[in-house]
Amino acid sequence: MVESERRRRPNINLAFIGIRLGDVLTLIDRPEETCVVVELESRLVFHKGEVKSLSAACNDAYGVQYNDPSAAWAYDGETLNTRRQRFEDYHVM
């Protein structure tokens, strides 16, 4: 594995990938499980009656510690990871 692949990616920037306050995110494998974005910079969402981080919402939804919430949460059917990659690829060109 290349050294750069071992490093943890920085936290996702929701505004950079076109997510806005009030947008609804769904779990990619459970579209009935949703949360609403309430804070962009600190990536806070409203989920099950509480404001929490994307990670905490993912952990609550799955009932276990989930290491990559941006691979689980989706916007318009596209995971946040996939959106980030698409936006990064576009801006590098």
Image (cartoon, rainbow, N blue to C red):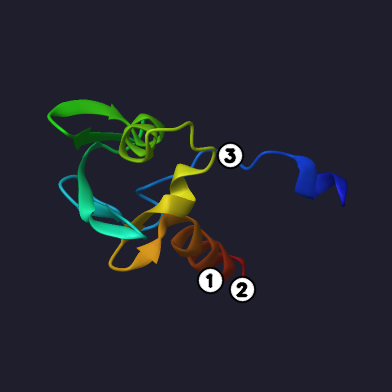
Residue at mark 1? 90
Which image quadrant: the C terminus?
A: bottom right
Secondary structure of residue under mark 2: loop
Residue at mark 3? 10
Instruction: State which mark lies toward you, 3 or 2.
Output: 3
Instruction: State which mark lies toward you, 1 or 3.
Output: 3
Mark 2–mark 1 contact, CB under 8 Å? yes
State the residue in front, 5 or 91: 5
Give me the C-alpha separation between circle 2 and circle 1: 6 Å
Q: Residue at x 40, y 57 (%)?
A: 17
90 relative to 5, above or below? below
The crowding category of the residue bearing disc 1, from other C-alpha atoms within 10 Å (few below 14, some 14 to 19, many at least 20), is: few
- Label located before the other in sequence (3 or 2): 3
Callout 2 amino acid: Met
Q: Residue at x 45, y 48 (%)?
A: 70
Quadrant hosting residue 38: top left
Give me the C-alpha separation between circle 1 and circle 3: 18 Å
State the residue in front, 92 or 86: 86
Q: Position of residue 77 (x, y in %)?
A: 32, 68
Q: Position of residue 6 (x, y in %)?
A: 78, 43
Mark 3–mark 2 contact, CB under 8 Å? no
The crowding category of the residue bearing disc 3, from other C-alpha atoms within 10 Å (few below 14, some 14 to 19, many at least 20), is: few
Secondary structure of residue under mark 3: loop
Quadrant hosting residue 21: top left
Give me the C-alpha separation between circle 3 and circle 2: 20 Å
11 relative to 18, above or below? above
Residue at mark 2? 93
Callout 3 amino acid: Pro
